[in-house]
Image (cartoon, rainbow, N blue to C red):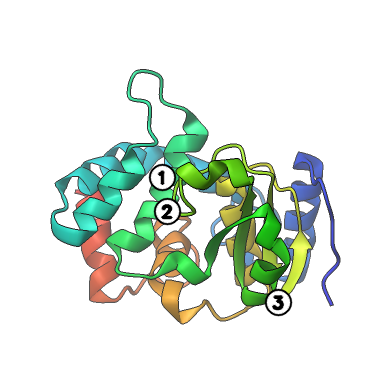
Amino acid sequence: MYSFKAYPNDDDFSSVAKSLISKHPSLTEPGPQPGCKNLEGDFYEALDQHTPRFIELFKSKKGTTGQKLTGLMQHINCLSPDVTALRSVVLRGLPILLGDDSSEVFKTCFDTAKEEALASVTVGVLTVVNEDAQQQGLNAVHLQPISTAIILEGSTVMDNVRDFPQAVCLLFGLMYALHLDYPKCMVNTLRFIQAVMLGLGSKTLPPKLLSLKNKLLG
Protein backbone atom coordinates (compact mmCIF):
# COMPACT_ATOMS: atom_id res chain seq x y z
CA MET A 1 0.00 0.00 0.00
CA TYR A 2 1.38 3.41 -0.98
CA SER A 3 0.73 6.54 1.03
CA PHE A 4 -0.96 9.58 -0.51
CA LYS A 5 0.46 13.07 -0.23
CA ALA A 6 -1.24 16.17 -1.59
CA TYR A 7 0.66 19.39 -2.30
CA PRO A 8 4.21 17.95 -2.09
CA ASN A 9 7.09 20.37 -1.87
CA ASP A 10 10.78 19.93 -2.70
CA ASP A 11 11.49 18.58 0.80
CA ASP A 12 8.83 15.92 0.25
CA PHE A 13 10.43 14.98 -3.05
CA SER A 14 13.84 14.72 -1.39
CA SER A 15 12.38 12.65 1.44
CA VAL A 16 10.79 10.21 -1.01
CA ALA A 17 14.05 9.92 -2.96
CA LYS A 18 16.17 9.30 0.14
CA SER A 19 13.70 6.75 1.47
CA LEU A 20 13.80 4.88 -1.82
CA ILE A 21 17.59 5.02 -1.94
CA SER A 22 17.86 3.56 1.58
CA LYS A 23 15.75 0.58 0.48
CA HIS A 24 17.23 0.26 -3.01
CA PRO A 25 20.97 1.09 -3.05
CA SER A 26 21.08 0.46 -6.80
CA LEU A 27 19.84 4.03 -7.19
CA THR A 28 23.32 5.18 -6.20
CA GLU A 29 24.89 3.88 -9.42
CA PRO A 30 26.67 6.18 -10.17
CA GLY A 31 26.26 8.85 -7.50
CA PRO A 32 28.09 12.00 -6.44
CA GLN A 33 27.99 10.93 -2.79
CA PRO A 34 28.01 7.49 -1.16
CA GLY A 35 24.45 6.41 -0.37
CA CYS A 36 22.71 9.31 -2.11
CA LYS A 37 21.94 10.06 -5.70
CA ASN A 38 20.39 13.40 -6.53
CA LEU A 39 17.84 11.87 -8.88
CA GLU A 40 15.90 15.06 -9.54
CA GLY A 41 19.02 17.13 -10.11
CA ASP A 42 20.60 14.55 -12.42
CA PHE A 43 17.33 14.13 -14.30
CA TYR A 44 16.99 17.85 -14.99
CA GLU A 45 20.70 18.25 -15.77
CA ALA A 46 20.56 15.50 -18.42
CA LEU A 47 17.26 16.78 -19.78
CA ASP A 48 18.49 20.36 -20.11
CA GLN A 49 21.84 19.27 -21.55
CA HIS A 50 20.23 17.29 -24.35
CA THR A 51 17.23 19.57 -25.03
CA PRO A 52 18.86 21.56 -27.89
CA ARG A 53 19.77 18.35 -29.70
CA PHE A 54 16.35 16.83 -29.05
CA ILE A 55 14.71 19.90 -30.59
CA GLU A 56 16.96 19.55 -33.65
CA LEU A 57 15.95 15.90 -33.99
CA PHE A 58 12.27 16.79 -33.58
CA LYS A 59 12.54 19.37 -36.38
CA SER A 60 14.25 16.88 -38.69
CA LYS A 61 11.42 14.32 -38.58
CA LYS A 62 8.95 14.02 -41.45
CA GLY A 63 5.60 12.32 -41.98
CA THR A 64 3.21 11.54 -39.15
CA THR A 65 5.99 11.57 -36.56
CA GLY A 66 7.13 14.99 -37.77
CA GLN A 67 3.58 16.37 -37.62
CA LYS A 68 3.15 15.23 -34.02
CA LEU A 69 6.49 16.71 -32.97
CA THR A 70 5.81 19.97 -34.81
CA GLY A 71 2.53 20.25 -32.91
CA LEU A 72 4.38 19.85 -29.63
CA MET A 73 7.02 22.43 -30.50
CA GLN A 74 4.34 25.07 -31.03
CA HIS A 75 4.24 25.33 -27.23
CA ILE A 76 7.79 26.70 -27.16
CA ASN A 77 8.22 30.46 -27.21
CA CYS A 78 11.41 30.87 -29.24
CA LEU A 79 11.91 34.47 -28.15
CA SER A 80 11.60 33.70 -24.43
CA PRO A 81 11.71 29.92 -23.91
CA ASP A 82 10.29 28.68 -20.62
CA VAL A 83 12.35 25.88 -19.06
CA THR A 84 9.27 23.96 -17.92
CA ALA A 85 7.79 24.19 -21.41
CA LEU A 86 11.04 23.00 -22.99
CA ARG A 87 11.32 20.07 -20.59
CA SER A 88 7.67 19.14 -21.07
CA VAL A 89 7.94 19.21 -24.86
CA VAL A 90 11.04 17.01 -24.82
CA LEU A 91 9.49 14.50 -22.40
CA ARG A 92 6.31 14.30 -24.47
CA GLY A 93 8.29 14.13 -27.70
CA LEU A 94 10.69 11.39 -26.62
CA PRO A 95 8.06 8.60 -26.79
CA ILE A 96 7.07 9.77 -30.27
CA LEU A 97 10.71 9.68 -31.35
CA LEU A 98 11.09 6.14 -30.00
CA GLY A 99 7.81 4.82 -31.39
CA ASP A 100 6.17 4.45 -27.98
CA ASP A 101 2.53 5.22 -27.19
CA SER A 102 2.42 7.58 -24.23
CA SER A 103 -1.36 8.03 -24.28
CA GLU A 104 -1.99 5.50 -21.50
CA VAL A 105 0.86 6.72 -19.27
CA PHE A 106 0.86 10.49 -19.85
CA LYS A 107 -2.87 11.03 -19.41
CA THR A 108 -4.69 14.37 -19.54
CA CYS A 109 -8.35 14.91 -18.66
CA PHE A 110 -10.78 17.71 -17.94
CA ASP A 111 -11.70 18.29 -14.30
CA THR A 112 -15.22 17.02 -14.91
CA ALA A 113 -13.83 13.63 -15.99
CA LYS A 114 -11.16 13.18 -13.32
CA GLU A 115 -12.71 10.18 -11.54
CA GLU A 116 -13.22 8.35 -14.83
CA ALA A 117 -9.65 9.10 -15.87
CA LEU A 118 -8.24 7.91 -12.53
CA ALA A 119 -10.04 4.61 -12.96
CA SER A 120 -8.44 4.15 -16.38
CA VAL A 121 -4.80 4.73 -15.36
CA THR A 122 -2.76 1.87 -13.89
CA VAL A 123 0.66 3.54 -13.99
CA GLY A 124 1.38 7.06 -15.10
CA VAL A 125 1.05 10.81 -14.79
CA LEU A 126 -2.46 12.27 -14.75
CA THR A 127 -2.77 15.95 -15.65
CA VAL A 128 -6.13 17.54 -14.84
CA VAL A 129 -7.06 20.69 -16.77
CA ASN A 130 -9.98 23.10 -16.69
CA GLU A 131 -12.81 22.82 -19.18
CA ASP A 132 -11.65 26.20 -20.49
CA ALA A 133 -8.65 24.39 -22.01
CA GLN A 134 -10.86 22.56 -24.51
CA GLN A 135 -9.64 24.79 -27.31
CA GLN A 136 -6.08 23.60 -26.71
CA GLY A 137 -7.12 19.97 -26.63
CA LEU A 138 -6.03 17.17 -24.31
CA ASN A 139 -2.87 16.43 -26.31
CA ALA A 140 -1.47 19.92 -25.75
CA VAL A 141 1.29 20.82 -23.30
CA HIS A 142 -0.63 22.29 -20.37
CA LEU A 143 1.68 24.45 -18.26
CA GLN A 144 -0.97 25.59 -15.78
CA PRO A 145 -3.11 22.53 -15.02
CA ILE A 146 -5.43 22.19 -12.06
CA SER A 147 -3.34 19.31 -10.76
CA THR A 148 -0.76 16.71 -11.75
CA ALA A 149 -0.76 13.32 -10.02
CA ILE A 150 1.41 10.20 -9.91
CA ILE A 151 -0.45 6.92 -10.31
CA LEU A 152 1.08 3.55 -9.37
CA GLU A 153 -0.77 0.25 -9.57
CA GLY A 154 -4.05 2.10 -9.95
CA SER A 155 -3.59 4.27 -6.85
CA THR A 156 -2.76 7.97 -6.55
CA VAL A 157 0.51 8.10 -4.59
CA MET A 158 1.11 11.84 -4.97
CA ASP A 159 -1.08 14.69 -6.17
CA ASN A 160 -0.50 18.36 -7.02
CA VAL A 161 3.06 17.73 -8.13
CA ARG A 162 4.78 20.98 -9.14
CA ASP A 163 4.82 20.34 -12.90
CA PHE A 164 4.86 17.65 -15.57
CA PRO A 165 8.68 17.22 -15.72
CA GLN A 166 8.88 16.65 -11.97
CA ALA A 167 5.99 14.19 -12.20
CA VAL A 168 7.81 12.18 -14.88
CA CYS A 169 10.97 12.20 -12.77
CA LEU A 170 9.04 11.01 -9.72
CA LEU A 171 7.24 8.32 -11.68
CA PHE A 172 10.49 6.99 -13.11
CA GLY A 173 12.24 7.09 -9.72
CA LEU A 174 9.45 5.20 -7.98
CA MET A 175 9.17 2.55 -10.69
CA TYR A 176 12.91 2.01 -10.85
CA ALA A 177 13.39 1.86 -7.09
CA LEU A 178 10.43 -0.44 -6.54
CA HIS A 179 11.49 -2.70 -9.43
CA LEU A 180 8.15 -2.29 -11.17
CA ASP A 181 7.96 -3.36 -14.81
CA TYR A 182 7.81 -0.46 -17.23
CA PRO A 183 4.53 -0.33 -19.18
CA LYS A 184 5.06 -2.05 -22.53
CA CYS A 185 3.75 0.99 -24.38
CA MET A 186 6.49 3.16 -22.80
CA VAL A 187 9.33 0.71 -22.23
CA ASN A 188 11.64 2.37 -24.78
CA THR A 189 11.17 5.83 -23.30
CA LEU A 190 11.64 4.82 -19.67
CA ARG A 191 14.60 2.61 -20.46
CA PHE A 192 16.19 5.47 -22.43
CA ILE A 193 15.75 7.77 -19.44
CA GLN A 194 17.24 5.11 -17.19
CA ALA A 195 20.23 3.98 -19.22
CA VAL A 196 21.15 6.96 -21.40
CA MET A 197 20.04 10.03 -19.48
CA LEU A 198 20.72 8.80 -15.94
CA GLY A 199 23.30 6.06 -16.56
CA LEU A 200 21.52 3.52 -14.36
CA GLY A 201 21.49 -0.25 -14.78
CA SER A 202 22.60 -2.18 -17.86
CA LYS A 203 24.55 -0.29 -20.49
CA THR A 204 23.51 -2.74 -23.22
CA LEU A 205 20.88 -1.08 -25.39
CA PRO A 206 18.56 -2.45 -28.07
CA PRO A 207 19.20 -1.05 -31.60
CA LYS A 208 16.44 1.60 -31.47
CA LEU A 209 17.73 3.11 -28.23
CA LEU A 210 21.37 2.85 -29.30
CA SER A 211 20.55 4.63 -32.54
CA LEU A 212 18.90 7.54 -30.72
CA LYS A 213 21.77 7.70 -28.23
CA ASN A 214 24.28 7.98 -31.08
CA LYS A 215 22.21 10.72 -32.75
CA LEU A 216 21.88 12.56 -29.45
CA LEU A 217 25.55 12.41 -28.57
CA GLY A 218 26.96 12.52 -32.08
- Taking the image as drawn, is residue 151 in sight? yes
- Assign a secondary structure to mark 1: helix
The three-letter amino acid code for the residue at tag 3 is Gly
Residue wearing tag 1: 89
Q: Residue at x 64, y 68 (%)?
A: 117
The three-letter amino acid code for the residue at tag 2 is Arg
| Contact? badges 1 and 2 (CB < 8 Å) | yes
Q: Residue at x 76, y 58 (%)?
A: 158
Q: How far apart, in angstroms, are the residues tagged by discs 3 and 2? A: 22 Å
Q: Is residue 45 toward the left or the right of residue 192 in the image?
A: right
Dividing the picture into quarters, in which one does residue 110 lie? Answer: bottom right
Q: Nearer the viewer, residue 191 or 202?
A: 191
- Taking the image as drawn, is residue 122 in sight? no
Q: Nearer the viewer, residue 16 or 82?
A: 82
Residue 165's place in the image compared with 208, above or below, is above
Residue wearing tag 2: 92
Q: Residues within 10 Å of mark 1 (few under 14, many from 20)?
A: many
- Assign a secondary structure to mark 2: helix
Residue wearing tag 3: 154
Q: Residues within 10 Å of mark 2 (few under 14, many from 20)?
A: many
Q: Residue at x 42, y 37 (%)?
A: 86
